[in-house]
Image: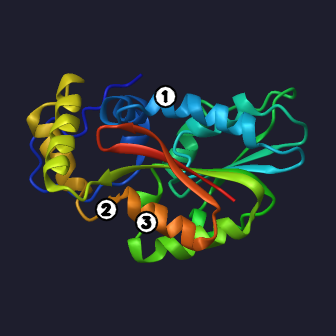
Protein backbone atom coordinates (compact mmCIF):
# COMPACT_ATOMS: atom_id res chain seq x y z
CA UNK A 1 0.00 0.00 0.00
CA UNK A 2 1.53 3.31 -1.13
CA UNK A 3 1.27 6.06 1.47
CA UNK A 4 -0.83 9.11 0.68
CA UNK A 5 1.57 12.07 0.68
CA UNK A 6 -0.24 14.19 -1.91
CA UNK A 7 -0.81 17.17 0.38
CA UNK A 8 2.15 16.86 2.75
CA UNK A 9 4.05 19.81 1.24
CA UNK A 10 2.81 23.43 1.00
CA UNK A 11 1.21 24.08 -2.38
CA UNK A 12 1.25 27.50 -3.98
CA UNK A 13 -2.22 26.81 -5.34
CA UNK A 14 -4.53 23.99 -4.23
CA UNK A 15 -6.52 22.76 -7.23
CA UNK A 16 -9.90 21.08 -7.03
CA UNK A 17 -9.74 17.43 -6.05
CA UNK A 18 -9.55 15.00 -8.97
CA UNK A 19 -9.38 11.22 -9.15
CA UNK A 20 -6.23 11.33 -11.23
CA UNK A 21 -3.14 9.11 -11.39
CA UNK A 22 -1.69 10.50 -8.14
CA UNK A 23 -4.89 9.72 -6.24
CA UNK A 24 -5.37 6.32 -7.89
CA UNK A 25 -1.90 5.17 -6.79
CA UNK A 26 -2.49 6.01 -3.11
CA UNK A 27 -6.26 5.51 -2.96
CA UNK A 28 -6.31 2.44 -0.66
CA UNK A 29 -4.24 4.31 1.94
CA UNK A 30 -6.17 7.56 1.44
CA UNK A 31 -9.59 5.99 1.90
CA UNK A 32 -8.51 3.95 4.92
CA UNK A 33 -7.12 7.02 6.70
CA UNK A 34 -9.86 9.45 5.63
CA UNK A 35 -13.20 7.60 5.71
CA UNK A 36 -14.25 6.09 9.05
CA UNK A 37 -15.88 2.68 8.74
CA UNK A 38 -14.98 2.12 5.10
CA UNK A 39 -14.02 -1.53 5.55
CA UNK A 40 -17.13 -2.28 7.63
CA UNK A 41 -19.30 -0.83 4.86
CA UNK A 42 -17.60 -3.06 2.29
CA UNK A 43 -18.26 -6.13 4.43
CA UNK A 44 -21.92 -5.17 4.75
CA UNK A 45 -22.23 -4.63 0.99
CA UNK A 46 -21.45 -8.32 0.64
CA UNK A 47 -24.22 -9.14 3.13
CA UNK A 48 -26.74 -6.85 1.41
CA UNK A 49 -25.87 -8.49 -1.90
CA UNK A 50 -26.39 -11.99 -0.53
CA UNK A 51 -29.84 -10.95 0.75
CA UNK A 52 -31.08 -9.09 -2.35
CA UNK A 53 -29.29 -10.49 -5.41
CA UNK A 54 -31.51 -12.33 -7.89
CA UNK A 55 -30.47 -14.96 -10.42
CA UNK A 56 -29.90 -13.74 -13.95
CA UNK A 57 -29.53 -10.07 -12.95
CA UNK A 58 -26.90 -7.37 -12.76
CA UNK A 59 -25.15 -5.66 -9.85
CA UNK A 60 -23.85 -2.15 -10.44
CA UNK A 61 -20.95 -0.38 -8.71
CA UNK A 62 -21.32 3.25 -9.80
CA UNK A 63 -18.23 5.30 -9.10
CA UNK A 64 -16.27 2.11 -8.58
CA UNK A 65 -12.82 3.65 -7.93
CA UNK A 66 -10.54 0.59 -7.53
CA UNK A 67 -13.41 -1.91 -7.42
CA UNK A 68 -13.61 -2.60 -3.69
CA UNK A 69 -17.42 -2.54 -3.65
CA UNK A 70 -17.51 -4.73 -6.76
CA UNK A 71 -15.39 -7.34 -5.01
CA UNK A 72 -17.60 -7.05 -1.93
CA UNK A 73 -20.70 -7.68 -4.05
CA UNK A 74 -19.02 -10.65 -5.69
CA UNK A 75 -18.39 -12.20 -2.25
CA UNK A 76 -22.12 -12.12 -1.55
CA UNK A 77 -23.44 -13.51 -4.83
CA UNK A 78 -25.00 -16.91 -4.18
CA UNK A 79 -27.20 -17.35 -7.26
CA UNK A 80 -26.28 -18.12 -10.89
CA UNK A 81 -25.82 -15.90 -13.93
CA UNK A 82 -25.07 -12.59 -12.22
CA UNK A 83 -22.83 -9.95 -13.79
CA UNK A 84 -21.21 -7.04 -11.95
CA UNK A 85 -20.86 -3.74 -13.81
CA UNK A 86 -18.19 -1.45 -12.34
CA UNK A 87 -18.31 2.11 -13.70
CA UNK A 88 -15.89 4.97 -13.07
CA UNK A 89 -15.22 8.10 -15.11
CA UNK A 90 -11.52 8.25 -14.20
CA UNK A 91 -9.27 6.41 -16.68
CA UNK A 92 -6.57 6.35 -13.99
CA UNK A 93 -8.90 4.66 -11.51
CA UNK A 94 -10.02 2.07 -14.06
CA UNK A 95 -6.42 1.40 -15.07
CA UNK A 96 -5.32 0.98 -11.45
CA UNK A 97 -8.35 -1.18 -10.58
CA UNK A 98 -7.12 -3.85 -13.00
CA UNK A 99 -4.39 -4.59 -10.45
CA UNK A 100 -7.07 -5.68 -7.97
CA UNK A 101 -9.77 -7.23 -10.13
CA UNK A 102 -9.55 -10.47 -12.09
CA UNK A 103 -12.25 -12.74 -13.45
CA UNK A 104 -11.72 -16.36 -12.44
CA UNK A 105 -14.01 -18.71 -14.41
CA UNK A 106 -15.76 -19.87 -11.24
CA UNK A 107 -16.64 -16.33 -10.03
CA UNK A 108 -19.28 -13.86 -11.24
CA UNK A 109 -17.61 -11.61 -13.83
CA UNK A 110 -16.81 -7.97 -13.09
CA UNK A 111 -16.97 -5.75 -16.18
CA UNK A 112 -15.02 -2.50 -15.92
CA UNK A 113 -16.39 0.49 -17.82
CA UNK A 114 -14.66 3.86 -18.04
CA UNK A 115 -17.58 6.27 -18.31
CA UNK A 116 -19.67 8.69 -16.34
CA UNK A 117 -22.30 6.59 -14.58
CA UNK A 118 -24.86 9.16 -15.71
CA UNK A 119 -24.31 7.87 -19.26
CA UNK A 120 -24.78 4.20 -18.37
CA UNK A 121 -28.12 2.52 -18.99
CA UNK A 122 -29.13 0.72 -15.80
CA UNK A 123 -31.19 -2.37 -16.48
CA UNK A 124 -32.16 -5.65 -14.82
CA UNK A 125 -30.46 -4.54 -11.58
CA UNK A 126 -30.96 -6.30 -8.25
CA UNK A 127 -28.15 -4.50 -6.36
CA UNK A 128 -26.81 -1.00 -7.02
CA UNK A 129 -24.04 0.66 -4.99
CA UNK A 130 -23.09 4.34 -4.87
CA UNK A 131 -20.22 4.19 -2.40
CA UNK A 132 -19.19 7.82 -1.75
CA UNK A 133 -20.15 8.75 -5.32
CA UNK A 134 -23.33 10.82 -5.16
CA UNK A 135 -21.61 13.51 -3.07
CA UNK A 136 -19.47 14.46 -6.10
CA UNK A 137 -22.52 15.04 -8.31
CA UNK A 138 -24.19 18.45 -8.60
CA UNK A 139 -27.06 18.42 -6.05
CA UNK A 140 -29.44 19.80 -8.68
CA UNK A 141 -28.89 16.65 -10.76
CA UNK A 142 -29.10 14.04 -8.04
CA UNK A 143 -32.83 13.32 -8.08
CA UNK A 144 -32.95 12.92 -11.85
CA UNK A 145 -29.97 10.57 -11.85
CA UNK A 146 -31.34 8.48 -9.00
CA UNK A 147 -34.69 8.28 -10.80
CA UNK A 148 -32.96 6.79 -13.84
CA UNK A 149 -31.25 4.23 -11.60
CA UNK A 150 -34.59 3.44 -9.94
CA UNK A 151 -36.20 2.75 -13.32
CA UNK A 152 -33.57 0.15 -14.11
CA UNK A 153 -33.96 -1.72 -10.83
CA UNK A 154 -36.13 -4.79 -10.25
CA UNK A 155 -38.80 -5.14 -7.54
CA UNK A 156 -37.25 -5.90 -4.12
CA UNK A 157 -33.83 -4.77 -5.31
CA UNK A 158 -31.61 -2.59 -3.11
CA UNK A 159 -29.72 0.66 -3.62
CA UNK A 160 -26.88 1.26 -1.15
CA UNK A 161 -25.63 4.83 -0.82
CA UNK A 162 -22.70 5.82 1.39
CA UNK A 163 -22.04 9.52 1.93
CA UNK A 164 -20.40 12.16 4.02
CA UNK A 165 -23.29 14.11 5.52
CA UNK A 166 -24.28 17.33 7.25
CA UNK A 167 -26.30 17.61 10.45
CA UNK A 168 -29.20 20.06 10.90
CA UNK A 169 -28.16 20.81 14.49
CA UNK A 170 -25.11 23.15 14.36
CA UNK A 171 -23.72 21.79 17.62
CA UNK A 172 -23.85 18.21 16.33
CA UNK A 173 -22.31 19.31 13.04
CA UNK A 174 -19.45 20.92 14.93
CA UNK A 175 -18.98 17.83 17.12
CA UNK A 176 -19.04 15.32 14.26
CA UNK A 177 -16.67 17.46 12.19
CA UNK A 178 -14.25 17.68 15.12
CA UNK A 179 -14.34 13.91 15.58
CA UNK A 180 -13.63 13.31 11.91
CA UNK A 181 -10.70 15.72 12.18
CA UNK A 182 -9.42 13.74 15.19
CA UNK A 183 -9.81 10.51 13.17
CA UNK A 184 -7.59 11.84 10.39
CA UNK A 185 -4.99 13.13 12.83
CA UNK A 186 -4.97 9.76 14.59
CA UNK A 187 -4.23 8.13 11.23
CA UNK A 188 -1.17 10.29 10.65
CA UNK A 189 -2.40 13.23 8.60
CA UNK A 190 -0.82 16.58 9.53
CA UNK A 191 -2.70 19.87 9.92
CA UNK A 192 -1.23 20.98 6.59
CA UNK A 193 -2.44 17.85 4.78
CA UNK A 194 -5.91 18.13 6.29
CA UNK A 195 -6.18 21.82 5.47
CA UNK A 196 -5.01 21.52 1.87
CA UNK A 197 -7.22 18.54 1.12
CA UNK A 198 -10.22 20.34 2.64
CA UNK A 199 -9.52 23.24 0.27
CA UNK A 200 -9.26 20.82 -2.67
CA UNK A 201 -12.65 19.31 -1.83
CA UNK A 202 -14.50 22.62 -1.46
CA UNK A 203 -17.21 22.90 -4.11
CA UNK A 204 -16.28 19.40 -5.31
CA UNK A 205 -17.75 17.28 -2.52
CA UNK A 206 -21.20 18.66 -1.60
CA UNK A 207 -22.68 16.98 1.48
CA UNK A 208 -26.37 16.89 2.45
CA UNK A 209 -28.35 15.77 5.49
CA UNK A 210 -29.67 12.23 5.79
CA UNK A 211 -33.23 13.56 5.76
CA UNK A 212 -32.58 15.23 2.41
CA UNK A 213 -31.36 11.91 1.02
CA UNK A 214 -34.29 10.03 2.55
CA UNK A 215 -36.99 12.38 1.22
CA UNK A 216 -35.48 12.29 -2.24
CA UNK A 217 -35.36 8.50 -2.40
CA UNK A 218 -38.92 8.11 -1.12
CA UNK A 219 -40.16 10.75 -3.58
CA UNK A 220 -38.57 8.80 -6.41
CA UNK A 221 -40.59 5.74 -5.42
CA UNK A 222 -38.49 3.55 -3.14
CA UNK A 223 -40.76 1.85 -0.63
CA UNK A 224 -38.18 1.90 2.17
CA UNK A 225 -35.16 4.01 3.00
CA UNK A 226 -33.20 3.64 6.20
CA UNK A 227 -29.80 4.50 7.59
CA UNK A 228 -28.01 1.35 8.66
CA UNK A 229 -24.53 2.71 9.47
CA UNK A 230 -22.89 5.79 10.95
CA UNK A 231 -19.34 6.61 11.99
CA UNK A 232 -19.04 10.32 12.82
CA UNK A 233 -20.19 12.31 9.76
CA UNK A 234 -20.12 9.32 7.40
CA UNK A 235 -23.20 7.16 6.92
CA UNK A 236 -24.55 4.46 4.68
CA UNK A 237 -28.21 4.03 3.79
CA UNK A 238 -30.25 1.42 1.95
CA UNK A 239 -33.30 2.00 -0.24
CA UNK A 240 -35.49 -0.92 -1.30
CA UNK A 241 -37.64 -0.80 -4.41
Q: Which quarter of the image is occupied by the C terminus?
A: bottom right
Task: Give the residue at x 23% y 29%.
Answer: 183
Q: In whole angstroms, how far apart are the C-alphas of marks 1 and 3?
A: 24 Å
132 vs 183: above or below:
below
Marker disc for residue 137: 3
Of marks 1 and 3, which one's residue comes earlier in the chain? 1
| Image marks 2 and 3: residues in contact by CB distance under 8 Å | no
Q: In whole angstroms, how far apart are the C-alphas of marks 2 and 3?
A: 8 Å
Residue 75 sits in quarter:
top right
Task: Give the residue at x 36% y 54%.
Answer: 18
Q: Which quarter of the image is occupied by the N terminus?
A: top left
Q: Is residue 120 visible?
A: no
Of marks 2 and 3, which one's residue comes earlier in the chain? 3
36 vs 236: above or below:
above
Q: In whole angstroms, how far apart are the C-alphas of marks 1 and 2?
A: 25 Å
Marker disc for residue 202: none
Marker disc for residue 40: 1
Marker disc for residue 204: 2
SS class, disc 3: loop
The percent position of residue 45, horizontal first and vertical second, equals: 60, 36
Amino acid sequence: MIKDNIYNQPLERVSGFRFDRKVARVFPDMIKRSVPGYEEILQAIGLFTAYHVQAGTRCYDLGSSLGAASLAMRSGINVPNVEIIAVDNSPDMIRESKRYIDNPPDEPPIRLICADFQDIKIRNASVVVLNYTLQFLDPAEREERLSIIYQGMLPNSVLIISEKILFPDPSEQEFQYAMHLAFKKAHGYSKLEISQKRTALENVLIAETFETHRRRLLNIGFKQCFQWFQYFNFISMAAVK
